Image (tube, rainbow, N blue to C red):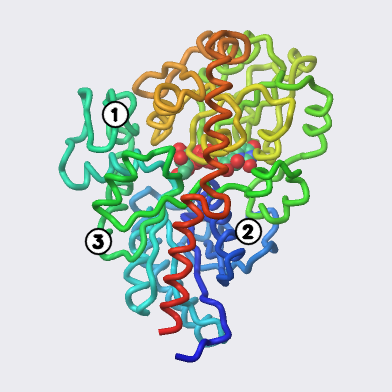
Amino acid sequence: MEQSPRPAHCLVFPYPMQGHINPMHQFSKTLVSKGIKVTLVTTKFLSKSFQQLSGSMPVETISDGFEGGYASAESLEAYFSKFKKIGSETLTKLIEKLNATGFPVDCIVYDAMMTWVLDVVKSFGLVSAIFFTQSCAVDNIYYHVKKGLINVPVENRVSLSGLSVLEPLDMPSFVHNPGLYPGLLDIMVNQFSDIDKVDWVLCNTFYKLEEEVIEWMSKQLRLRAIGPTILRKCLNNQKTREDDTDNGLQMFKPNTDAYMNWLNEQQDHSVIYVSFGSLAELNAEQMQELAYGIKQSGKHFLWVVRASEEGKLPKGFVEETSAKGIVVQWCSQMEVLAHKALGCFVTHCGWNSTLEALCLGVPMVAVPIWTDQRTNAKFVADVWRMGVRVDTDKNGVFKGEIVGHCIREVMDGEKGKEVKTTSKKWMDMAREAVKEGGSSDISINEFVASLTQHYKS
Ligand SMILES: O=c1ccn([C@@H]2O[C@H](COP(=O)(O)OP(=O)(O)O[C@H]3O[C@H](CO)[C@@H](O)[C@H](O)[C@H]3O)[C@@H](O)[C@H]2O)c(=O)[nH]1
C-alpha cells in the first residue's frame, strides 16, 4: 500500500481544568516529537483564560454550553449533562471542519472524565484513547466500585487486587465520604463506562512506580503506563525558563522574576515550597493553620496562594514573615521544584504535583485535602517513602502544628535522610521510564505505531 505523506492526526481533549490540561498537553508534546500531528481541544470559555494560546501546537475550541464555564452552571450535574450534549455537537462540527480542511482526524485522546467523547469517536470510525490523569491505584479503586467489588462508603480497611491494604482514610474521599459530592463519585466511577469498547487506555504513571496494580489492570484493560507526562526539559536538568512558551496553557500568570530572584538568593536545599494546586479551597481557619505550620517550621518558604484565596490569609502574615518567605499567586512549578534552593514540597498531593516532585527528587510533606490526594499521600509516605503525611480527618481538616512538625522532620530529622535517598531513587526511575527505550517510551511508541497503521489502512 502506498504511504500517504501526511502524519497521523490526533485530537487531544483534556477536561477543562488546569490539573488535566497540564499532563495531556505534555503528552501531546511527546506525540509531536514522535511525528504525530496534534491539535489540542479545549472549551471556548477556558481558552479565554489561558495566558497564551500560541505554543508548539494548534488549539481548537468547542463549547461546553455555558458562557461563563463551569461557574455559571447551577450544579455539577447540570454542567456535565449540558457539556455532554453541546460538547458532542460542537466536537462533531470541529472534526467535520478539520476533515474538510485537509487535516483529517485519525484519533482522539480524551480525558476519562468525559466518557461521552467515545460516541463521537465511534461515529467517525476513529481510534479512541482514554487518558487517566490520576494514579493507576486510584483508577483501580474506582474500577472496583464500578464492578461492584467494593461498596461505597468504604468504612473498613480493604484489600484490593494489585494494591496493599488501605484504610478508609487512604481511599479517595468520594469513596470514603461521598456525602458532600455524590455527583463527583458518579463521574469518577463512570470513567469505566464502555471502557471495554475503547482502543487504548493511557495512564499517567510508570511501570516501576505501580508495578503490581498496572499488571493487574492490564489484565482487565488494554492499559498502558505512559507517564510521567511532565515538562521533559526539566528531566534533563536543563533550565525551564525558555520552555515557558511550551508550557503555555496556563490559567494563571506567574510573576517569575520576583520569586526566581528571591530563590536565587537562598541557600541550597533550604526552602520549603508550599502549593495546593489549581483547585483546592481552604477555609479561613485551615488557611490560618497552614500559615501557623509554615511559620512554626522556622524555614524559608515560597507559598503559592491563588488570587481567589488571598483574602483568607491571616491578617499581617505577609508583612510579619517577609524576612523568611514570600507569597505569590502562581508560579512556574516545575521551574521552582527544579531550583537548587528547594528543600521540600508541602503539597496537597494532586497527582501532577506528586509526579513533578518525584521526577525532580524533591521530598514531600503531604497534606491531602480530598479526592485522590489521600491515596497519593498514602503511597508517598508509606509505599514509596518519598515524604511524610500530615494527618487529615474525613473532611480534610489538619492541624498547623503537625504541618510544622512534619516540615522539620523532612528538612532536619532522621526521617528526612531516608526520604531524601528514596526520593532520589524514584527520580532516577522516573527518568529511566521516559527516556528512549524506557517502559513508558516503549508504550508510547506502540500507541504511535498503531495510529500510523490506522491511517494507512
Ligand atoms: O503555582 C502553581 C501551582 C500549580 N501549578 C501546576 O498546576 C498543576 C496542578 O495539578 P495537581 O497537582 O494535579 O493539582 P490540582 O490542580 O488540584 O489537580 C486536580 O486534578 C488532578 C489530576 O486529576 C488530581 O490529582 C487532583 O487531586 C485534582 O485536584 C501542576 O501541574 C502544577 O505544576 C503551577 O504551574 N503553578
Q: Amino acid at mark 1?
A: Ser
**Label placed on residue 208:** none
Residue at the disc numbered 1:
164
Residue drawn 75% across the image and 22% down it: 268
Q: Is residue 305 above or below residue 81?
A: above
Residue drawn 38% across the image and 31% down it: 375
**Quick check: can you spot residue 398?**
yes
Disc 3 within 8 angstroms of ligand 1 (CB): no
Q: Amino acid at mark 3?
A: Asp
Relative placement, left or right, of 39 versus 132 is right
Decide which of 432, 148 is in the foreground and name it: 432
> Residue 157 in the image: x percent, y percent?
22, 23
Q: For marks 3 and 2, give the CA distance.
A: 36 Å
Label 3: state its secondary structure.
helix
Q: Is residue 143 above or below residue 123?
A: above
| Crowd band around label 2 with a 10 angstrom C-alpha radius: few (<14), some (14–19), many (20+) | few
Q: Residue furthest front?
A: 437
Q: Earlier in the sequence, mark 1 or mark 2?
A: 2
Q: Nearer the viewer, mark 1 or mark 2?
A: 1
Relative placement, left or right, of 58 versus 260 is left
Label 2: state its secondary structure.
helix
Decide which of 337, 48 is in the foreground and name it: 337
Quadrant of ligand 1: it is top right
Pick the quarter of the image with the N terminus: bottom left
Residue drawn 34% across the image and 45% down it: 214
Q: For marks 1 and 2, give the CA distance.
A: 43 Å
| Crowd band around label 3 with a 10 angstrom C-alpha radius: few (<14), some (14–19), many (20+) | few
Residue at the disc numbered 3:
196
